[in-house]
Image (cartoon, rainbow, N blue to C red):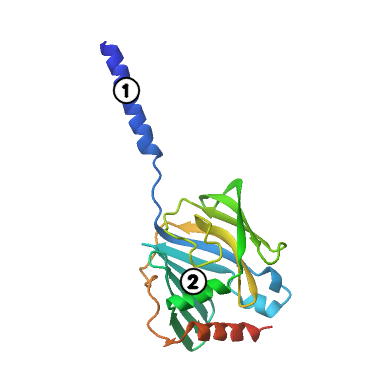
Amino acid sequence: MLVKHSSVFIGICILLLCSCTSKKEVINEGTIIYSADYPNHKKNIFLYNILPKEIEISFKNGIVRNDISRGNFQNILLFDCNKKQMDIYFQYGEEAFKTKLSPNEIQKMLNDQTKYDIRFTDETDTLAGFNVKKALAVSKKDQKDVITLWYTEEIELKNPNWYNTFKEVPGVLLAYSVDRFGIRMDYKATKFIPKADESKKPLFTLPAKGTSISYDEYNQKMNNLFATFE
């Protein structure tokens, strides 16, 4: 009887040990480095060379910071995934502007995005240290416009795609494409930094400087800027 009870006790201990060691750490903050490419603008050597070849996306407490910077150009997008709010900071040379989008402006932004049907697949892979799943985004207007998406569900982030055209995707996108200001932008995660480093600068508030403008004014300025390079 003692041997039997001992065997049961040991079995329970092994189960508890396995369940503890197999529990994955919750990832709810960090910075993802993405490579950036512009496949439709490689012939425009001047524009292609000045466009950022890397972006950083940091997240913490449900706030996401998308930082696109190169030289004297910086575009910061702040998304609150809990409250579904959005702020923008834009600097080019000596000029700096910032925009806090109203609910109507956010809806306009969402309405202006190309609409896609999301088709989930059984394909899996790894990217930047994460397990990822594959999905295909097929344009509702042009069936030839197909974007390959790779996303991970290992990052704890509520409503991770509420602000983009892939809102049906349940995880954080680690490889995707977007169209902004007439440019197709391809992003692919290359590195993950587990903590969002704010030792040198605050990541989840916009810089204090900058003239406040509307979302329409911001779009006009960005369109005019990229048009000068065409």
Residue 174, image x and y in percent? 54, 58
Q: Is residue 92 visible?
A: no
Q: Quadrant of the N terminus?
A: top left
Residue 154, image x and y in percent? 46, 50
Viewer-nearest residue: 84 or 24: 84
Dot 2 falls on a residue whose secondary structure is: strand
Query: Is residue 24 positioned above or below 145 on the image?
Result: above
Alpha-carbon distance for marks 1 and 2? 52 Å
Mark 2 residue crowding within 10 angstroms, few (<14) / some (14–19) / many (20+):
some
Query: Is residue 62 positioned above or below 50 on the image?
Result: above
Location of residue 150 (image quadrant): bottom right
Q: Residue flagged by tag 2: what amino acid is it?
A: Asp
Q: Residue flagged by tag 1: what amino acid is it?
A: Ile
Dot 1 falls on a residue whose secondary structure is: helix
Q: Which residue is mark 2?
A: 67
Image point 45% across, 62% down: which residue? 31
Q: Is residue 81 visible?
A: yes
State left or right for residue 143 relative to residue 71.
Answer: right
Mark 1 residue crowding within 10 angstroms, few (<14) / some (14–19) / many (20+):
few
Disc on res. 10: 1
Q: Are marks 1 and 2 in contact (CB under 8 Å)?
A: no
Residue 25, image x and y in percent? 39, 47
Residue lying farthest to the top in this orientation: 1
Location of residue 226 (image quadrant): bottom right
Location of residue 85 (image quadrant): bottom left
Viewer-nearest residue: 206 or 178: 178
Q: Upstream in the sequence, badge 1 or badge 2? A: 1
Q: Quadrant of the C terminus?
A: bottom right
